[in-house]
Amino acid sequence: MNKKNIGINSKSGGENDEISIRISQIRQYFCENINRLFSTKTGIDEATSAKICSGTRGVGANILEKIVKAFPSVDARWLITGEGEMLYQTTNQVKDTAIVDYLDKKLQEKTEECVRLKLELEAIKEYAAKYAEKGEAYSGTTTLMEK
């Protein structure tokens, strides 16, 4: 098997159709689905890239190589197999994701604490109102949890 034929360049078939879909996603993401721009960036003939994206032309290793070279942030494993994400995550993206996850967790904790405090405040108001009905002063020195 030579470099041009890696077993996925038949005109139709499930695997080739899936690769065509992924190439279309790359064209959409990086070139706003403008075929001429995609062809210019990749060096793939316009007619060829249009046929690939429509699924009517097979994809060989030379085409995949041009795409990966033109768009180095595209994960070649994803392009060929569909596994993983379209774009590599940079270290900064991983750090940003970790920070966002941490902040989401803290926000959830604070939201839960606010709900708990609102409920406690309402209970204290009710308790104070009962004291007021009896004509007694509520000192507020004890919490409802102690009662």
Image (cartoon, helix red, strand yellow):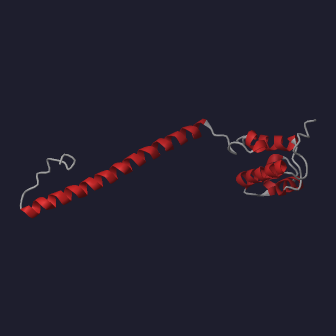
Frontmost residue, 41 versus 57: 57
- Residue under the image location 11 percent in, 51 percent down: 139
Relative placement, left or right, of 97 versus 81 is left
Q: Is 20 rendered above or below residue 72? A: below
Quarter holding residue 70: top right
- Quarter of the rendering containing residue 134: bottom left
* Vertical arrangement, residue 70 with respect to residue 135, above or below: above
Query: Which residue in the rendered view is the most extreme toward the right?
Result: 1
Residue at x 82%, y 48% (from the top left corner): 15
Point out the residue furthest to the bottom here: 133
130 to the left or right of 44: left
Residue 41, given in percent of the width and then of the height, sits at: 79, 48
Q: Position of residue 124 (x, y in %)?
A: 20, 55
- Residue 70 shows up from this direction: no
Please state the total of marks drawn on the protein image. Answer: 0
- What residue do we see at 37% from left, 48% from top? 110
Q: Is the residue 119 above or below the residue 3 in the image?
A: below
Q: Residue at x 72, y 41 (%)?
A: 75
Viewer can see residue 47: yes
**Quadrant (top left, top right, bottom left, bottom right) of the N terminus:** top right
Is 137 in front, or is 130?
130
Comparing 50 with 14, the one in front is: 14
> Residue 81 appears at what percent x and percent y?
77, 42
Q: Residue furthest front?
A: 147
Residue 84: x, y in percent? 68, 42
